[in-house]
Amino acid sequence: MKEELRGKLKNKRNLFCGAARKSADAVIAKTFFDVCGAYERYFVYNAFSSEAATSSVIDGLVAAGKKVYLPRVEGENIVAVPFGKTGKGAFGIFEPKGQAYEGETDVTVVPLLAVNKRGYRIGYGKGYYDRYLKDRKTLKVGFGYGFQIEDFQEDAWDEPLDVFICENGIYRFKK
């Protein structure tokens, strides 16, 4: 079922473009800053393809003097690396160069293909973010679009989000 849902939502997300997409991304960024702008350390995915945009969020955080970290794939895991020089990494995504950060972040922003009403997400199926988020003390925030809210059953290894932000507003999940 998850594979089927991944395909369906990738297609739907690819078709969501133009002014509607730009407007949705602007609302997501504004909502994010309204809700999460007071923290100091942020781990934010570097959006690619049809994922909800993160460039304005990353730029805004850097401009505000916040500590920003981007993900880099290392083997079967992702690590947080301070924002700075990037190069093409795993899966053609631009990843940061430099030493991995070992500390905690206040907020972690993750991509998704779907999220359910209990706060569980479907990613690309490699488990990178579930492994990264396990046992971390960070506010877990998903970025996406309203049409990505779907009904599905999560797996035992899935890590729930605390918050999902989309163009329709913010969804908070009970723990």
Image (cartoon, rainbow, N blue to C red):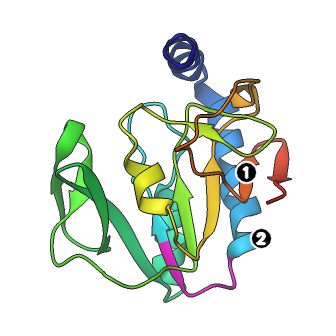
When asked about the image quadrant of residue 127, the answer is top left
Q: Is residue 55 above or below residue 10?
A: below
Name which residue type carries label 2: Val
Q: Residue at x 70, y 63 (%)?
A: 32
Do the residues bearing badges 1 and 2 touch, measured as CB atoms within 8 Å? yes
Majority secondary structure of magenta residues: loop
Callout 2: helix, strand or loop?
Answer: helix
As for residue 39 lying within the magenta part, the answer is: yes
Quadrant of the frame with the C terminus: bottom right
The residue indicated by pointer 2 is 35
Q: Earlier in the sequence, mark 1 or mark 2?
A: 2
Residue 26 at x, y percent in the picture = 67, 51
Front-most of residues 147 and 133: 133
Rendered image quadrant of residue 102: bottom left
Determine whether the residue tagged by mark 1 lies in a helix, strand or loop: strand
Residues at marks 1 and 2, CA–CA distance in whole angstroms: 10 Å
> Label 1: which residue?
165
Q: Where residue 103 sits in the image (x, y, percent)?
A: 39, 85
Magenta region: which residues? 37-42
Q: Residue at x 58, y 25 (%)?
A: 17
